[in-house]
Image (cartoon, rainbow, N blue to C red):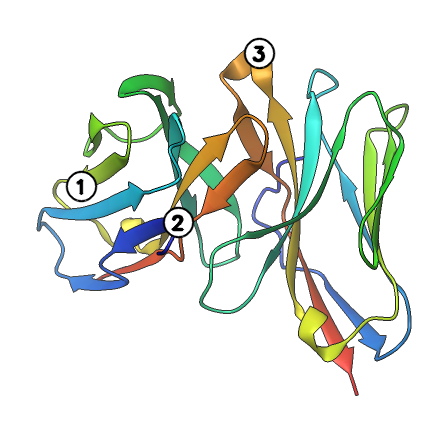
Amino acid sequence: GESVGLHLPTLSVQEGDNSIINCAYSNSASDYFIWYKQESGKGPQFIIDIRSNMDKRQGQRVTVLLNKTVKHLSLQIAATQPGDSAVYFCAENMKAAGNKLTFGGGTRVLVKP
Amino acid sequence: DTAVSQTPKYLVTQMGNDKSIKCEQNLGHDTMYWYKQDSKKFLKIMFSYNNKELIINETVPNRFSPKSPDKAHLNLHINSLELGDSAVYFCASRDLERGYTFGSGTRLTVV
């Protein structure tokens, strides 16, 4: 969903632990959802996506869960590594609005060695 | 062989000036976008073009004018720059199968 400019939340996680990042989206008409990772000085980088007709999708070390009933999306990162330190964004795509991609407010993940 | 490239990477300019940011993609995508990222990291869409045609135009001051000379290019021209225009601007392109690819951003600082 859309942030209203709130302070960026931070998740601190020990290296090797699992991370869970949560996101609430706003529009039930969104047809698919994407998680992005943004490292300092770089653009958002695609991690994983999920269609609205699915509730779970797995990638390499990452799993996305979609709960349409409560409009909630989560990203699970297994065995978090120092290279996973970044800001993570969820985004919802609306095909009906010309494939408009709306980003959530972002979560900063800090991996402690 | 950068997929989505933006120039310049950094732009510092005075209030009232007019400046342009250029974006090019070599992915063969039909759709391109401009996003603005503020100091709190919030990313908001500004414009979208599909094959040179304007598709999305969010509530953006008309000092901002996108131009797409062909489907591989989407430039952003900003007139009469204001302090509040300071942000990082990201260009992106989209493929139906593979989704969105973002450029590395242009950090605009208005002084």
Chain of residue at mark 1:
B
Cβ–Cβ below 8 Å for labels 1 and 3? no
- Badge 2 local density, few (<14 within 10 Å), some, or many (20+)? some
Quick one: label 3, few (<14), some, or many (20+) residues within 10 Å?
Answer: few
Q: Which quadrant: the N terminus of chain B?
A: bottom left
Which of the numbered marks, if any, corresponds to residue A96?
A: 3
Q: Tell me the chain of label 2.
A: B
Q: Are marks 1 and 3 on the same chain?
A: no
Whether residue B41 is visible to the viewer of this picture, yes or no, is yes
Q: Which mark is residue B78?
A: 1
For this rendering, which residue is in front, A5 or A110?
A110
Task: State the image coordinates of residue A98 (x, y, percent, origin top left).
Answer: 49, 16
Identity of the residue drawn at 21% across and 27% down: B70
Residue B62, position as x, y percentages in the image: 22, 28
> Mark 1 falls on what kind of element?
strand
* Residue B15 as seen in the image, left or right of residue B100: left
Residue identifier under label 2: B3
Specify the label residue B10 is tagged with.
none
Q: Are marks 2 and 1 in contact (CB under 8 Å)?
A: no
Task: Say whether residue B111 is visible.
Answer: no
User: Callout 1: 10 Å neighbours few (<14), some, many (20+)?
Assistant: some
Determine which quarter of the picture holds residue A66. top right
